[in-house]
Image: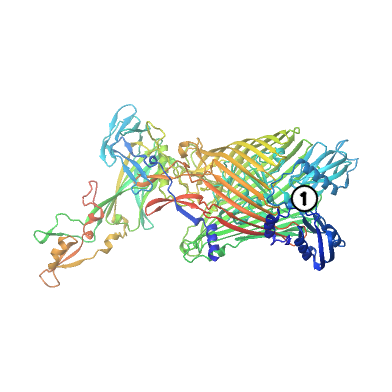
Amino acid sequence: MQQRITHIGIAILLLMACREPYEPELSSFDHNILVVEGYIDIGESPTQFRISRTNPIYGEVASDPQTQAQVSIEGEREGIWTLHNQGEGIYTLEGPLPQNQPYRLTINFENSSYASAFVEPILTPEIGRINFEKSNGGMKIYASTQGNEEARYFLWGYEETWIYRTPFVSYFEYDLELGDFVNRDQLLYQCWDNETSTRVIMESSEKYENNSINNKELLEIPVNSEKLGQRYSILVRQRAIDKDAFAFWENIRRNSDDIGDIFSPLPSFVRGNISNLNQAEEPVIGYVSAGISTEKRIFIDRSDAHPWNAIIPEYRACLVDTISMEDYERHFRVSINVPLYEWCGDFSAVCTAFLATTRNCTDCRMRGGTIDRPSFWEDLSF
Amino acid sequence: MKRKYGILCIWIAFISLICTGHVQAQEAENKLISGLFSGVSFERFAQMVEQRSPYQFFFDPEDIPELSININAYQNTLPQLLNQLFKDTDLHYVIDTEGRVFVTKGRGITLQGAEKLFMPATETDTLPTGEETGKEREERSFAKNRLWQIGSAARSETPTHARLSGLVTSFESGEPIIGAVIYALDHEGRTITDDDGLYSILLPKGRITLVIQSFGAYQEQRQVNLLGDGTLNIAMDDNIISLMEVTVTSEKSANIERPEMGLENISMQSMRKIPAVLGEVDVLRAVITLPGVQTVGEASAGFNVRGGAADQNLILYNNATIYNPTHLFGLFSAFNPDMMENVDLYKAGVPVQYGGRLSSVLDVKGKFGNKEKLEGGGGIGLMTSRLYLEGPLGEKTTFAAGGRSTYSNWLFGLMDEESEFRESRASFHDLNLNMSHEINKNNILKFSGYWSQDAFRFDLDTAFAYSNQNANLSWTHYFNDKLEGEMTIGHDRYAFSIAGELDPLNAFDFGFTMNQSHWRTHFNYDLDDAHNVSFGMNHVLYNLSPGSILPQGQESMVIPEVIGRERGLESAFYIGDEYEVNSKLLLNGGVRLVMYNYLGPNTVNQYPATTIRSEGTLIGQENYGTGEVIETYLGPEVRFSARYSLDNFTAIKAGFNTNRQHVNMLTNTAAIAPTDTWKLSDPHIRPQTGNQVSLGYFKNYKNNIIETSVEVYYRSMRNLVDFGSGANLILNESIEQDILNTEGQAYGVELMAKKTSGKLNGWISYTYSRSLLRTSPQELGEMINDGRWYPSNFDQPHDIMLVGNWEFTKRINTSINANYSTGRPITLPIAKFEYGGAERVFFSDRNDHRIPDYFRVDISFNLEGNHKIRKLAHASWSAGIYNVLGRANPYSVYFAPTNGVLQGYQLSIFAQPIPFITYNFKF
């Protein structure tokens, strides 16, 4: 009886009484929507578009790049420019376009054609200043700019690049043929890594006096991030967009936050300015804006962030091992271990062992970085 | 075989009636009885007679305790024996054609009534015909045949006619009887008693037979010699009549008679017959059985009337506004069924004295206690109990007090230790106190107080609580025969809080409070026979604290945040007239002038006039001082309705009304959730306005026993509040950035057929309705679904409701309640993609999909105790099963990432059949 009453109690009272998986039937059309992202840059910067389609919500891969599209830009008065297919759904166009006309993007597939609305290019003002400031242990980076009558809504993106180092430096490698250690051609302890913005950063200059935006926060580098361990650079790209585009991006921004539980809203989506020319009601995601984007790069050195204790979790477990001569072949041949220095005992002149560690702890490329110095990179100058 | 009126034996009685009714339904009258009955009790005597003859006895043993029988019968008829036995007692008996013997103490019973009462359940339902009622009328009038001399010839309204007025009350409870029809036999003109049981009618002088017809289908008569203007108060014995009361009175003849459209009146009697969860008689559940009223799910006692949002219903309890009308996340309504007198729902044709909401007015009238004697009652159910007491306090004062409480917490304690709900708690209570004091004949003071409190939590972590607190005082003054005034002042408070307690560093207290003070002045003036004028004014001062979060305890690191208070004053001046052009055409019209002031102190965000309101476009803030008027909105509301009777049983009605609303509920669920906050209209959020046109055709058949109606309506609404994608509603200091000015339209047709009395009664209704929204074309921000019309959260086009009662006997009835409706719309995430460097989710158009359809059947049995007037307690049982089919009707659908993949879940609240039983008593 007790059990029974309890059951009634559960059934009656609890909102969680019955939760079942729910997979609404969605037609295949529903998850095959064209996604267009990019910006028609009529200035020096290349124009780049990424064409993809949506994937089913219950799948694992988010995006389905479209590699078979014919993508071009049309001027309202004159000119058609075809973008070059770079693969993986990326289409690019180099070089400036005439400034005095609206543009639109056209995308042609074998049996369907899409086009954006004609958009008036907006000349983005220069980025006034990029500054940074330590705040609660982290580092905040801000942008400031001066809007005008034409350019009032701004969108920012950035690319971060930074140096990180392995805890140990290997100057040698084991030459299998010689059966001995040789100097490395290339040291692998220092890499450049980069990251692009994933947040939507936007602001309108309308609310400020003289349309001037001051110290718009772009990002915060979290406390003890590896990014400020050596030297860091950020390239900020600023684009002025029109009001409709602003609303579109605002929506993208809000939709990105978590989608919820019972009480959270199920949001809807603003589509943008691209449509299927034969079937106007077909949803297409994306908003094509045009104009000249502006960029600015700054560097932040570790001394600017001092004190900054960069922690790279993968390197916390790095230990040095001693490999005796008879084990060289076994250990270094299969490249589990990487030689560091020869160990010659305390007072002996005969070196009998080699200090070694794992490859992960000496080869920074293992974490995804590159040892190639980026062309824009400037070292700290005194 | 012996039966009695006892409570416990009622089942046996019921079963044996079915089993034996036919066999013994033979000619019993002439059966002769022989035997020696020496020193036996009457019970034993009856038993012996029953063994020897087909007679059956019905009596209450308590009536005849001392009687000892010494009689030697030889070939005697039963009447001979009984006449002998009852010679020196006050016992009476009556024998019906079926051989049933009814023994009563004090007064005899009339067989015509009793015959129907105990008709075997297998008999087909017989509807009283006009002739029958005529016969009854004569019999009753005989009993009431006293000549009442009224007035003096010196004072009368016209030389030939005089005005008769007075109060109609229940003989049993002393409560006024509302809506009784009063007319004189063979004369023109009729009237209906008002909300206070008062009537006034102009009649020709001289001898007349006054007929008072209560909606319980029972008539009272008075022989009146009308000499001049005067007063006649009438007490009607409605106790026995209530046995024959129909399921839903819905103002029986008012269906045809009244000009208002879309007025639904639900009697407590009918509410008791609708199967409810856990056996509680529930106003809100009864309301949603009516056509045009829908709900979005089980645990949401908020309701939607004709495509309006849940916050567009004005819910009044004795003039107090109830902001959250539910307990336990909507399982119970906040109204104690014992404390209610009457419930009116105005879906259209809202009377001119009400305003402030767009869709409907639910007017719950509480009891003020009867004048005759102290009475009480209550109920005991699996999870809740309730108790009430009413009666006189001295000569002039009456009171009614009631309370309810739950004891559900113990259920959670019983759960397995591993159960994730073991730490859940849920409880509520509510208290009512209503008092009425008659200062003198012309002045009545009434006090009404209401308190409700809910507390629940799902785990140790977070506790929710909410509370309604209302009190008001009203003074009714009769200036003269024609002018009546009522002034009410009161205060309403609604508050909720969320306390997060588990982690001392993050402990917080979130609170929301709505306070409103109101002052209502209402006058009613009987201009003449044709015109009844009402006028007055309402003032409501809103004082709202939209939200605050405060750290709890010393260690808490929560940063306190308090959203500034909001104040607003809503003032309305109104005048209306009910004009009876002739006996066929009745017009009712009125106008309200509503002024709303948004008051300081406050800080208002400023945006450039022609841009979207967003964080990015905020220019600055403007401060206003205390009492400063920040914004004023002024507008009229029009109320008009007309009725044209084609004949006595057919009417056409039409109505048009406009409404304005200055409070907006901020919710992203379709129902009323305990965490919904409210927002006043302000410079950014204009008052909601709406208008409705409706047309209806009403036809009654079989002497008003079958009522049918077709109503069509079209509503349009402006300045509704909908939210942009991903809006955050709690603790949002600039909520205007998330609000999209939205317009709405709703239309529908409601078909209903109702049988109001007889063994089988109930109704079936079908509603086709749509409720659509569209982002206003003037809106500068996001256009939901590209500015196209989209279904609202509660757009459920098809809705079928069946409520049926079958009365086996007058004491045993069973009811069934079946509801089908289209699933409500939702927005589904349908695809994902990459954009702006991250993975994003693509949602369907707003409300482009629907959750599965809703279908539920409930059954219940009600067992009434006996109907003797003098006994200790009147008891009844109600038992049944909610959701008999055990269908898992989804309440909500939501999506959450599981192992990195988004998974949808549907949530059902009552996925299994839920049995319930409640014991109710009255003393």
| Residue count near mark 1 (Cα–Cα under 10 Å), binned few <14, some 14–19, many ≥20 | few
In the rendered view, does B278 fall on the left or right side of A343? Answer: right
Using the rendered image of the protein, determine whether residue B781 is visible from the camera's viewpoint.
Answer: no
Amino acid tagged 1 = Gly
Residue B812 position (above or below residue B831): below
How many numbered badges does the structure rendering display? 1
Residue B648 position (above or below residue B321): above
Using the rendered image of the protein, determine whether residue B803 is visible from the camera's viewpoint.
Answer: yes
Q: Quadrant of the C terminus of chain B?
A: bottom right
In depth, the one of B427 and B698 nearer the eye is B698
For mark 1, give the secondary structure.
Answer: helix
Residue B741 position (above or below residue B30): above
Image coordinates of residue B35 in percent, x first then y, are 81, 64
Image coordinates of residue A171 in percent, x first then y, are 16, 59
Residue sitting farthest toward the top: A77
Q: Looking at the image, which residue is at 78% across and 62% down? A: B49
Question: How is the rendered protein coloured?
Answer: rainbow
In depth, the one of B6 and A43 nearer the eye is B6
In the rendered view, does B452 fall on the left or right side of A112? Answer: right
Residue sitting farthest toward the left: A178
Residue sitting farthest toward the bottom: A347
Residue labelled with disc 1: B113
In depth, the one of B427 and B257 nearer the eye is B257
Image coordinates of residue A316 in percent, x first then y, are 28, 63
In the rendered view, does B314 fall on the left or right side of A211? Answer: right
Q: Quadrant of the N terminus of chain B?
A: bottom right
In depth, the one of B534 and A238 nearer the eye is B534
Q: Chain of mark 1?
A: B
Residue B916 position (above or below residue A196): below
